[in-house]
Image: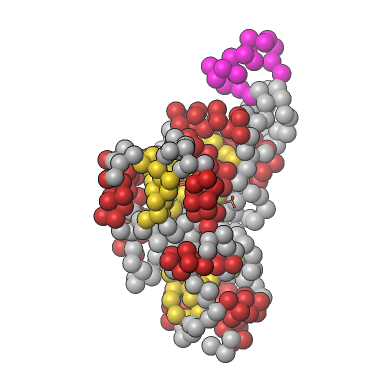
Amino acid sequence: MTNLRGKAFSTRAVHAGERMKQGEHTPVTTPIVPSVAYLYESMDELDAIFANTRQGYVYARYTSPTVAAFETAVADLEEGEAALAFASGMAAIQAALLAAGVCAGSHVVCAYDVYGATYSLLTRLFAGLGVRTSLVNVSDLPAVEAVLREGGTTALFVETISNPLLKVADIPALAELSHRHGAQLLVDNTFATPCLIRPLLHGADYVIHSATKYLAGHGDVLAGVVVTDAANCLRMFETNKLLGSNLGPFEAWLALRGLKTLPLRVREQCRNAQHLAQWLAERPGVAKVNYPGLAGHPQHALAKALFGDQGYGGVLSFEIQGAGRADAFRFMEALQLCLAATTLGDIYTLILHPASSSHRTLSEAERQQIGITEGLLRLSAGIEDPLDIQADLEGAFQTLKL
Ligand SMILES: Cc1ncc(COP(=O)(O)O)c(C=O)c1O
């Protein structure tokens, strides 16, 4: 493997995890290794690998070379000791919660505006297994502390940039608060990506990605990954040997390939999102634009402090003036270039109606409480020319006569 110590982020994105030795030669790009099981000269060797006293591969549900290469690369980019890849972002979130010690009788504190499936995982599925979750506004630090002060909290779960309202979490302050009250901080860094922030450097204990989004970046692979310290990772690894939610080698190969252009894509997506947010903010017929890059965003200064000059992410959301669900659907159907598809972080510009998709599992009352209205649309900027996307959106506004 190339020595990447001290190298820049974009250099590491290209080379991290690569140069896996294969006998006498070293392929430039990591190959897909689909083998389920592995042979060794002696049974003692196999036994040592089973016992984690020697590195190696035993069985693909434990780990396999292509997956390990992807894990090494993401751990490097997030500046963590170790990473474990999963079959989806949701599998990664579940694994991180379990590794943090969440079990029957535990208390979890979670930002109320998180991805809908995360919200439902905690408030429905985990609740049924005896886990109590308190939902908080993580932008209100005294309110978060008031809940943590009650004691007995195992984990605080937040998204760096929240889905779909684009709130920015004060990761350093939340890390300090959670540790002071004996809880671990789990950060879903899917929207921000390690290009903008590496939460482990700010005190987070676990960083989680839906690698389906920016890390892989091309809308052709479902994947998740957790980055944490070596001891936590070993615990996740042992648990996952039983749960089997691991990533497959073909998907790992695609995700690793995607990582190489992550800095290029995210730079362009941030620029395009900034352009579109500013245009939408000034356009009549738009009631509200949520984007941390806008000077009027409530956490704009915080985002600037945390992300430096890397940009403010590729996702924004906006409310169409006076729109109900039918108007929002009509707007989406009128689009030619923006794809009305249920994902984000791809090279394509994508648009989604949170109330009927990403946050569908929430009740109407829960959505209202969070601020997800029927006229809210989430846009994930791709890498197309932003003027073409702007013209496409303008055409859709015209069909609503706005
Ligand atoms: C912020 C965030 N976290 C996690 C997930 C879940 O990821 P996956 O769909 O890969 O399971 C999503 C999916 O949209 C997401 O937006």
Q: Is residue 66 visible?
A: yes
Residue 54 highlighted magenta (yes or no): yes
Residue range in magenta is 39-57
Percent position of residue 311, x then y: 42, 61
Image-based side of 93 in relation to 153, left or right: right
Percent position of residue 73, x then y: 53, 39
Residue 164 highlighted magenta (yes or no): no
**Above or below — where is 40 with respect to 11?**
above
**Above or below — where is 329 with respect to 173?**
below
- Residue depicted at 55% across the width and 27% down the height: 238
- Residue depicted at 64% across the width and 65% down the height: 341
Closer to the camera in the image, 203 or 186? 186
- Residue depicted at 29% across the width and 45% down the height: 150
Percent position of residue 41, x then y: 69, 12
Closer to the camera in the image, 55 or 332? 332
Percent position of residue 207, x then y: 45, 43
Image-based side of 93 in relation to 141, left or right: right
Q: Quadrant of residue 180?
A: top left
